C-alpha cells in the first residue's frame, strides 16, 4: 500500500503542530479521489445532492485551514450530512491523506496552579462565557454553557454549548445560532486519585464530523464568598486532525464579569502564566433586533453538480483540511 505521505528526511524526524506547518516542508501526497465514491459513495451522494451541501463544501475550501472561517461555514451550512461525509472521507477511510506524525504531546502539559480537587457540583446550571483568550475559539457572541450530571457518582457531566456566529455586515449582517452538546468526565474530584496530566476534566468526541480530545484546567474560582462574585477561570488544551489548539476563558453568572471578581481572576491567571489583560470581553448583549439566519433549506441557487472540483479543485474542501497539499508551499 502507498504511504500516507511521501517519506522525506523532514517527515521522518520532525513533528508538526498542524497540516499547514507540515505542508510547508513536505509535498503532500494527492488524495485518493476514487475513495470518495467507492468507500463513501452514499455519504458523497447524500451531501452533494442538494445546494446546501455543495455550498458548505465550497465554503470550507475557501477557508484554507483557518478555524474561525470554518466555524462560520458550519454555522451557515452545517448539517448531519456534512458531518457524516467528513467523518467517512477524512477519518474512517483516509480519502484525504493526512500526516500521522503530528505532535499532540502539548495537550497533556498542564498547569501547576490548576485545582487539585474540584467539586463539579459547583458547575451545575448556567454559566456565561464573559472573557476569552483565543479568537478562533473563545470569542463568539452570546456564549453560555449549561451543565448537568449524567451519572449517580457525579463524575460525568453533559455540557450544553450555545453561541452566535455573526455574518459580516458587508454581506448583510445577522447571525447564526449554534447549539451543541459535549460530555465531560471529571478527573480532579479527589486529590488521591491518579491524575498524571493534572487536568480538572476532559472531553472527547466528534465536532463537525472530526474527532477531538480536550483537557480542561480550572485555574481559579469563587463560589460567591468574601464579596467575590461567582466565577471560574478555565484553560484548555486539545487537538483534532488539523493540529493542536488551546485557549482560556472566564465563566460568570452574569453576561459581563462583575468588576468585583476581576482582581481574583487576574491573580489566578497570573499564577498560571496568563495575562488577563490579553483576554477580550465577549459580546453577550444578544440583540434581538435582527432575526437568526438559521434555515434548514439555506443555500439555494447553486446548480453545479461537479463535486470533484469542490473536493480537490482550487478552493475545494481539501484546501481547508490540508492547506498547501498541492505543494504550493514547497519551492
Image (cartoon, helix red, strand yellow):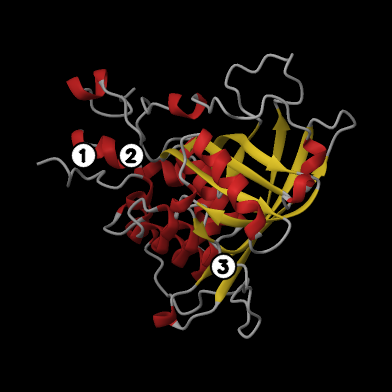
* Residue at the image position 53 percent from the left and 45 percent from the top: 248
Q: Mark 2 sits on what residue?
A: 19
Report the front residue among 243 and 217: 217
Q: Compute the Cα span from label 1 to label 2.
A: 9 Å
Q: Nearer the viewer, mark 3 or mark 2?
A: 3
**What percent of the width, then of the height, locates residue 10?**
20, 24
Q: Mark 1 sits on what residue?
A: 24
> Considering the numbered disc 1 on the image, is that residue within a helix, a strand or a loop?
helix
Q: Nearer the viewer, mark 3 or mark 1?
A: 3
**What percent of the width, then of the height, locates residue 44?**
49, 53
Report the front residue among 73 and 2: 73
Classify residue 222 by image quadrant: top right
Q: Choose the circle earlier in sequence order: 1 or 2.
A: 2
* Residue at the image position 77 percent from the left and 39 percent from the top: 157
> Considering the numbered disc 3 on the image, is that residue within a helix, a strand or a loop?
loop
Q: Choose the circle earlier in sequence order: 3 or 1.
A: 1
Residue reaching furthest left? 331
Report the front residue among 33 and 215: 215
Q: Is residue 304 visible?
A: yes
Q: Compute the Cα span from label 3 to label 2.
A: 31 Å
Q: Compute the Cα span from label 3 to label 1.
A: 36 Å
> Considering the numbered disc 2 on the image, is that residue within a helix, a strand or a loop?
helix
Q: Mark 3 sits on what residue?
A: 283
* Residue at the image position 44 percent from the left and 80 percent from the top: 169
Tell me the quarter of the image containing the C terminus. Answer: top left
Q: Choose the circle earlier in sequence order: 3 or 2.
A: 2
Classify residue 245 by image quadrant: top left
Amino acid at each position: 500500500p502507498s504511504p500516507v505521505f511521501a517519506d522525506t528526511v523532514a517527515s521522518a524526524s520532525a513533528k508538526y503542530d498542524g497540516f499547514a506547518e507540515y505542508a510547508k516542508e513536505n509535498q503532500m501526497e494527492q488524495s485518493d479521489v476514487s475513495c470518495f465514491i467507492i468507500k463513501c459513495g452514499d455519504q458523497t451522494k447524500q451531501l452533494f445532492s442538494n445546494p446546501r451541501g455543495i455550498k458548505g463544501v465550497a465554503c470550507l475550501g475557501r477557508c484554507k485551514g483557518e478555524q474561525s472561517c470554518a466555524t462560520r461555514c458550519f454555522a451557515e451550512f452545517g448539517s448531519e450530512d456534512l458531518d457524516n461525509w467528513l467523518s467517512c472521507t477524512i477519518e474512517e477511510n483516509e480519502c484525504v491523506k493526512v500526516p500521522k506524525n503530528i505532535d499532540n504531546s502539548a495537550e497533556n502539559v498542564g498547569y501547576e496552579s490548576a485545582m487539585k480537587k474540584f467539586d463539579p457540583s459547583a458547575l451545575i446550571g448556567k454559566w456565561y462565557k464573559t472573557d476569552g483568550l483565543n479568537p478562533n475559539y473563545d470569542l463568539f457572541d452570546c456564549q453560555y454553557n449549561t451543565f448537568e450530571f449524567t451519572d449517580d457518582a457525579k463524575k460525568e457531566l453533559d455540557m450544553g454549548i450555545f453561541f452566535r456566529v455573526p455574518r459580516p455586515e458587508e454581506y448583510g449582517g445577522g447571525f447564526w445560532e449554534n447549539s451543541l452538546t459535549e460530555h465531560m468526565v471529571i478527573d480532579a474530584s479527589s486529590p488521591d486519585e491518579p491524575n498524571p496530566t493534572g487536568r480538572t476534566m476532559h472531553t472527547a468526541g466528534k465536532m463537525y464530523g472530526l474527532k477531538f480530545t480536550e483537557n480542561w484546567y480550572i485555574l481559579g474560582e469563587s463560589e460567591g464568598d468574601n464579596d467575590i462574585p461567582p466565577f471560574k477561570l478555565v484553560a484548555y488544551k486539545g487537538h483534532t486532525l488539523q493540529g493542536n489548539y488551546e485557549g482560556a476563558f472566564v465563566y460568570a453568572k452574569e453576561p459581563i464579569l462583575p468588576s468585583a471578581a476581576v482582581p481574583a481572576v487576574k491573580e489566578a491567571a497570573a499564577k498560571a502564566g496568563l495575562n488577563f489583560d490579553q483576554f477580550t470581553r465577549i459580546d453577550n448583549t444578544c440583540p434581538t433586533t435582527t432575526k437568526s439566519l438559521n434555515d434548514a433549506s439555506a443555500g439555494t441557487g447553486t446548480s453545479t453538480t461537479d463535486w470533484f472540483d469542490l473536493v480537490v479543485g482550487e478552493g475545494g474542501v481539501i484546501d481547508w483540511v490540508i492547506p498547501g497539499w498541492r505543494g504550493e508551499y514547497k519551492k
